[in-house]
Image (cartoon, rainbow, N blue to C red):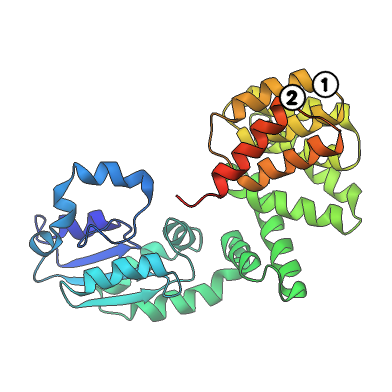
């Protein structure tokens, strides 16, 4: 587990503890922690009682991405309480256990550390051996090379997309892979391979008729090609499946603005304003409104939302 493995090790009298990127502030309440957990932590004082709860005799292993500052801050907090062994991973936070599972390394790592093997070597050699068949590895490489090394990024985007598509075809996890598929489809379209992009998007809708992201692929391609009525139908189908899909709803807003249906756009925009969203998405709406020559309440709302989201928390 994460911090839970550390906190349960004493009561369970564990011999070995394998903590995967513990993200709770397990020692110091001032350490960085996701806002979503802050309120829960206030009612869980034992999260700050790690020195008393962590087993005094167990061998403690912590899986962590050494380049990710937040996870490393928590690692150092654990390190101050007991001797621990770091096992480096190329992914941080929740992506670390997902990568280990997809690469079929999690059980190998658990059994290996119990048997006294070098956990770092297990992950390193396993990653090299299995990375070609793990979409998450290539997706991470694509993120790391954004804005530099275009050839490496293109290769990573292609591999992540193709592996994710293959997973969907085999009936595997759908939602996990759609981010990589979306980036891959966008790259195909940008490279002038629109027919291939359209083919992938259509296939995803056929294979995943209950997945809003599949319809968003079709809508995005239609929007870029100027087929606005088709884009509207696809985005509308997506938000019928998931009414909380605000990023897709924002795409529908931009489509409606281009169609000149400002009243419908305003209705959807007001609903989007209730969620936080991304300032970049709202900025795109501001630009769309300016392009259409729209003024008034919608512009004020979108501009205010951009400013609010860009303001430091």
Circle 2 packing at 10 Å, graded few (<14), some (14-19), many (20+), is many
Q: Secondary structure at mark 1?
A: loop
In-front residue for pair 231/273: 273
Q: Residue at x 71, y 53 (%)?
A: 183
Reply above or below: 61 against 228.
below
Q: Residue at x 66, y 48 (%)?
A: 280
Location of mark 1 (residue): 261
Location of mark 2 (residue): 265
| Picture coordinates of residue 32, whole percent (x, y) | 34, 59
- Horizontally, residue 21 falls left or right of residue 302, namely left
In-front residue for pair 5/243: 243
Circle 1 packing at 10 Å, graded few (<14), some (14-19), many (20+), is few
| Picture coordinates of residue 258, whole percent (x, y) | 86, 31
Reply above or below: 301 against 197.
above
Tag 1 and tag 2, C-beta contact below 8 Å = yes
Quadrant of the image containing the N terminus: bottom left
């Amino acid at each position: 587990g994460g911090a839970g493995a550390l906190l349960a090790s004493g009561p369970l009298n564990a011999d070995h503890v394998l903590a995967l990127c513990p993200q709770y502030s397990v020692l110091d309440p001032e350490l960085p922690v996701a806002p979503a957990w802050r309120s829960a932590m206030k009612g869980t004082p034992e999260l700050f009682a790690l020195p008393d709860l962590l087993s005094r005799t167990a061998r403690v292993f912590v899986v962590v991405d050494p380049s990710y500052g937040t996870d490393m801050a928590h690692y150092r907090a654990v390190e101050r309480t007991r001797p621990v062994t770091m096992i480096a991973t190329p992914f941080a936070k929740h992506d670390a256990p997902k990568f280990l599972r997809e690469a079929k390394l999690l059980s190998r790592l658990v059994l290996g550390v119990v048997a006294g093997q070098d956990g770092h070597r297990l992950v390193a050699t396993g990653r090299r051996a299995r990375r070609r068949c793990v979409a998450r590895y290539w997706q991470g490489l694509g993120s790391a090379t954004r804005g530099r090394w275009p050839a490496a990024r293109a290769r990573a985007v292609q591999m992540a997309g193709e592996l994710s598509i293959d997973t969907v075809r085999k009936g595997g996890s759908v939602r996990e892979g759609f981010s990589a598929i979306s980036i891959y489809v966008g790259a195909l379209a940008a490279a002038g391979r629109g027919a291939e992009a359209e083919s992938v998007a259509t296939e995803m809708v056929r294979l995943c008729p209950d997945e809003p992201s599949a319809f968003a692929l079709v809508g995005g391609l239609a929007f870029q090609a100027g087929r606005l009525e088709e884009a509207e139908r696809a985005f509308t189908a997506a938000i019928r499946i998931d009414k909380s899909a605000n990023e897709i709803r924002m795409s529908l807003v931009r489509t409606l603005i281009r169609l000149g249906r400002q009243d419908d756009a305003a209705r959807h925009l007001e609903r989007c304003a209730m969620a936080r969203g991304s300032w970049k998405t709202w900025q795109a709406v501001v630009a769309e409104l300016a392009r259409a020559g729209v003024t008034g309440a919608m512009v004020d709302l979108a501009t205010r939302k951009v400013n609010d989201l860009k303001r430091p928390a």
